[in-house]
Image: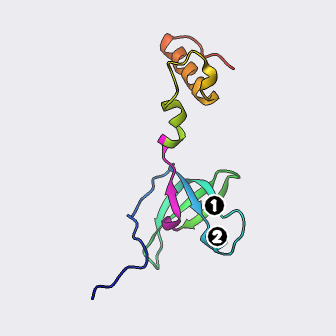
C-alpha cells in the first residue's frame, strides 16, 4: 500500500542578490503576532555549516532592517511583471490619461521624452 504525502511538495527556488521577495516570519505567524509578513530584498545566500541548507540574508524594505538566516521555504519571489502590470496594460488608446495610474503616466512621459530627445516633464 503506497504512503501518502501529508504536505504538498514545492519546487526548490533559488534567489539572486537584489530579488524582491515576500517573507513570512513563521514563528510570529503561528503565535498570532502581528508583523509576520514583509517585503524584502535579497542581499546574499549562504550554506549553513551544520544543516547544509541554503539560507538567505534579506533587508526588510519598510524599515531597512537586516534579516539573517531566512529559510527559503518561507519566501516567495515578487515578480517584476506584477509590479509593472499597470504600465504594461495601460490603455494607450484612451485619450484621457485619467484612465491610467499616475505611475503609468509618469513612465510614459519619461520614455516619450527620451525617445524625442526632450527633457522629461515633472508633474
Quadrant in the rendering for residue 6:
bottom left
Q: Residue 123 at what x, y percent from top left?
A: 69, 20
Position of residue 94 in the picture relative to residue 65 (left or right): left
The residue sitting at 54% across, 40% down in the picture is 83
Residues at discs 2 and 1 in contact (Cβ within 8 Å): yes
The residue sitting at 60% across, 70% down in the picture is 26
Q: Residue furthest left?
A: 1
Quadrant (top left/top right/bottom left/bottom right) for the N terminus? bottom left
Q: Which of 61 and 103 is in front in this view?
A: 103
Mark 1 secondary-structure assignment = strand
User: How many labels sit on residues?
Assistant: 2
Tell me the CA gap for discs 2 and 1.
8 Å
Mark 2 secondary-structure assignment = helix
The residue sitting at 52% across, 36% down in the picture is 84
Position of residue 73 relative to residue 109, above or below, is below
Position of residue 2 in the picture relative to residue 50 (left or right): left
The residue sitting at 64% across, 74% down in the picture is 30
Query: Magenta stretch containing residue 75, yes or no?
Result: yes
Mark 2 lies on residue: 29
The part of the chain drawn in magenta is: 71-81
Query: Which comes sooner in the sequence, label 2 or label 1?
Result: 2
Position of residue 117 relative to residue 40, above or below, is above
Q: Residues within 10 Å of mark 2 (few under 14, many from 20)?
A: few
Q: Residue 79 at what x, y percent from top left?
A: 48, 46
Mark 1 lies on residue: 37
Q: How crowded is mark 1: few (under 14 residues within 10 Å), some or many (20 or more)?
A: some
Q: Residue 75 at what x, y percent from top left?
A: 52, 61
Q: Which of 29 and 13 is in front in this view?
A: 29
Q: Please say which color scheme the image uses.
A: rainbow
Quadrant in the rendering for residue 52:
bottom left
Q: Residue 8 at what x, y percent from top left?
A: 41, 71
Amino acid at each position: 500500500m503506497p504512503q501518502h504525502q501529508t504536505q504538498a511538495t514545492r519546487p526548490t527556488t533559488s534567489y539572486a542578490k537584489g530579488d524582491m521577495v515576500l517573507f513570512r516570519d513563521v514563528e510570529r505567524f503561528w503565535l498570532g503576532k502581528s508583523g509576520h509578513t514583509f517585503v524584502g530584498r535579497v542581499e546574499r545566500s549562504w550554506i549553513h555549516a551544520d544543516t547544509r541548507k541554503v539560507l538567505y540574508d534579506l533587508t526588510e524594505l519598510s524599515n531597512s532592517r537586516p534579516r539573517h538566516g531566512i529559510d527559503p521555504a518561507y519566501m516567495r519571489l515578487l515578480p517584476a511583471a506584477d509590479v509593472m502590470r499597470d504600465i504594461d496594460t495601460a490603455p494607450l488608446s484612451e485619450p484621457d490619461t485619467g484612465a491610467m495610474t499616475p505611475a503609468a503616466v509618469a513612465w510614459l512621459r519619461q520614455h516619450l521624452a527620451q525617445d524625442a530627445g526632450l527633457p522629461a516633464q515633472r508633474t
